[in-house]
Image: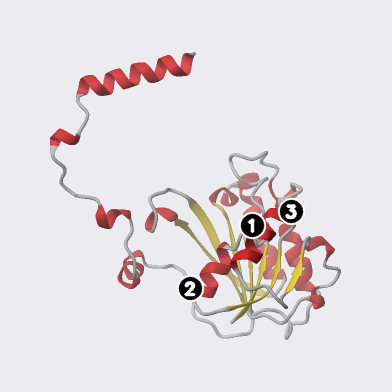
Amino acid sequence: MKFIDFFAGIGGFHSGLENAGHEMVGWVEWDKFARQSYEAMYDTEGKYTANDIKSIKDGKELPEADLWAFGSPCTNISLAGNRKGLQGEQSSMFFEVIRLLKDRTWEEKPSYLLMENVKNLLGSNKGFDFFRVLYEMDEAGYDVEWEVFNSSWVIPQNRERVYIIGHKRGIEYKPVFPINRGELEKKRKYNVLRDVLETSVDSKFYLSKDKVEQLLVNDKKSTFY
């Protein structure tokens, strides 16, 4: 499939989609340093690009693509952010994607949408922001499914994200979610941390109770100072 990479960053979606055999035909990213990294890592020559999604006057400017991928900014949705939700300056960029979609006819629209955001999107603004995302995709002509994934499936880090897939209405499709972790494990072709960690460790490698208590005391002291 051909895909457009919105809010491209340094190419998280690009890497995954390209490794799965898909082709990037356009990308949008405003941060100059992220753009430099993206251009250094991927073949962008001759591909459509824009610095700012708001500068795209009409969705018909965009090249034909089967999939639009976007991890719209989570700045105002994240628990670490200001929690203004979809009304915040950065996170409201989601509506720019919807605007561009609505500029295109049914035939011109991509067959799939792939959106990613922080898990807190589910509860942002008491859940109304997530409802708005689903509503806007539905209004743009897409049947929607979603699931929350934790990066701990594949890397030693807990990082929960919600993934939303939109299927263009009127086209027969097979649901993607739920994804079975066991099936993923069977297909995995590389090792992760749990593959190399020992399940039984000699007690001599554990800290003694006295050492643990001393570390806790030292930590409290350093925090106080």
Label 1 – label 3 distance at C-alpha: 14 Å
Mark identifier at residue 167: none
Identify the residue at horizontal 67%, vertical 69% (top origin). 138
Label 3 element class = helix
Mark 1 or mark 2, earlier in chain? 1
Q: Amino acid at mark 2?
A: Val
151 relative position to 82: left or right: left
Mark 1 lies on a secondary structure that is helix
Residue farthest to the front? 40
What is the x, y in percent for residue 70?
64, 64
- In this rendering, does residue 31 appear at all? no
Residue 179 against residue 105 in the figure, above or below: above
| Point 53% across, 57% down: residue | 162
Q: Position of residue 196 (x, y in %)?
A: 25, 55
Disc number placed over residue 176 in the picture, else none: 2
How far apart are the alpha carbons under marks 1 and 2?
20 Å
- Quadrant in the rendering for residue 76: top right
Q: Mark 2: give few (<14), some (14-19) or many (20+) Cα within 10 Å.
A: few
Please tell me which residue lies in front, 184 or 26.
26
Q: Earlier in the sequence, mark 1 or mark 3?
A: 3
Hey, what amino acid is under mark 3? Ser
Which mark identifies residue 131? 1
Which is closer to the viewer, label 1 or label 2? 2
